């Protein structure tokens, strides 16, 4: 688990890069929800469902299938945005969650192929420090270390890329005028 804020930075960066005309605020909010939603599986974890079970933490909700489901539902609900664009944005937001989790240094891998396979996946390189699960424990020295690693490994590259794309879009738009 990178923290919820760090998951949310992905839809934010995508929205900055694509622009408000393409990603209106309603779609952005839905994207933020889609990027955080997979960690709703900590609820069954605290209720006693084992971490490694298919419905445990980083299980079914961290799969490509789940991301597709969330994107489909969201895109159907957001009728003012063209379906393919809403679906693509929400799918990227939702799937970025398990992909970021797969880069963390702790816990079990993500069940990307659930419900078809229970295998847990990690990326070949893992450099984001895993965040403590409980919110209270976040405000400790370990929490600080996690925050620093997330800022450097996720926020910085995401916001930098997004700003560059935004800037490029701006320059192209002014050039056309
Ligand atoms: Zn997660």
Image (cartoon, grey):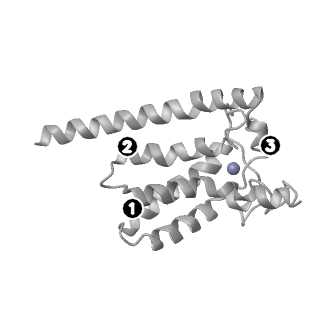
Residue under label 3, please give it: 107
Kindly identify the residue that appears in the image at 64 percent across and 27 percent down. Answer: 148
Q: Which type of secondary structure does the marked residue at label 1 adopt?
A: helix
Residue 71 appears anywhere in the view: yes
Residue 113 appears anywhere in the view: no
Graded by Cα atoms within 10 Å as few (under 14), some (14 to 19) or many (20 or more), the crowding at tag 1 reads some
Residue 86, image x, y percentages = 42, 63
Residue 173, image x, y percentages = 19, 42
Q: Are marks 1 and 3 in contact (CB under 8 Å)?
A: no
- Left or right: residue 158 versus residue 57 is left
Q: Quarter-wise, where is residue 135 in the image?
A: top right
Q: From the viewer's perspective, is residue 122 above or below residue 82?
A: above
Residue under label 2, please give it: 17
Whether the residue carrying mark 1 lies under 8 Å from ligand 1 is answered with: no
Residue under label 1, please give it: 85
Whichever of labels 2 and 1 marks the residue nearer the N terminus, that label is 2
């Amino acid at each position: 688990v990178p923290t919820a804020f760090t998951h949310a930075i992905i839809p934010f960066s995508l929205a900055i890069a694509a622009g408000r005309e393409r990603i209106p605020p309603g779609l952005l909010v839905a994207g933020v929800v889609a990027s955080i939603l997979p960690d709703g599986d900590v609820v069954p974890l605290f209720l006693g469902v084992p971490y490694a079970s298919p419905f445990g933490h980083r299980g079914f909700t961290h799969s490509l299938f789940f991301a597709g489901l969330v994107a489909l539902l969201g895109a159907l609900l957001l009728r003012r945005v063209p379906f393919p664009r809403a679906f693509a944005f929400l799918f990227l937001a939702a799937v970025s969650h398990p992909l970021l989790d797969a880069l963390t240094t702790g816990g079990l891998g993500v069940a990307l192929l659930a419900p078809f396979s229970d295998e847990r996946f990690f990326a070949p390189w893992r450099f984001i420090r895993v965040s403590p699960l409980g919110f209270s424990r976040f405000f400790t020295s370990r929490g600080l270390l996690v925050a620093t690693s997330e800022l450097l490994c996720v926020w910085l590259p995401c916001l930098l890329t997004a700003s560059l794309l935004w800037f490029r879009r701006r320059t192209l738009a002014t050039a056309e005028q």
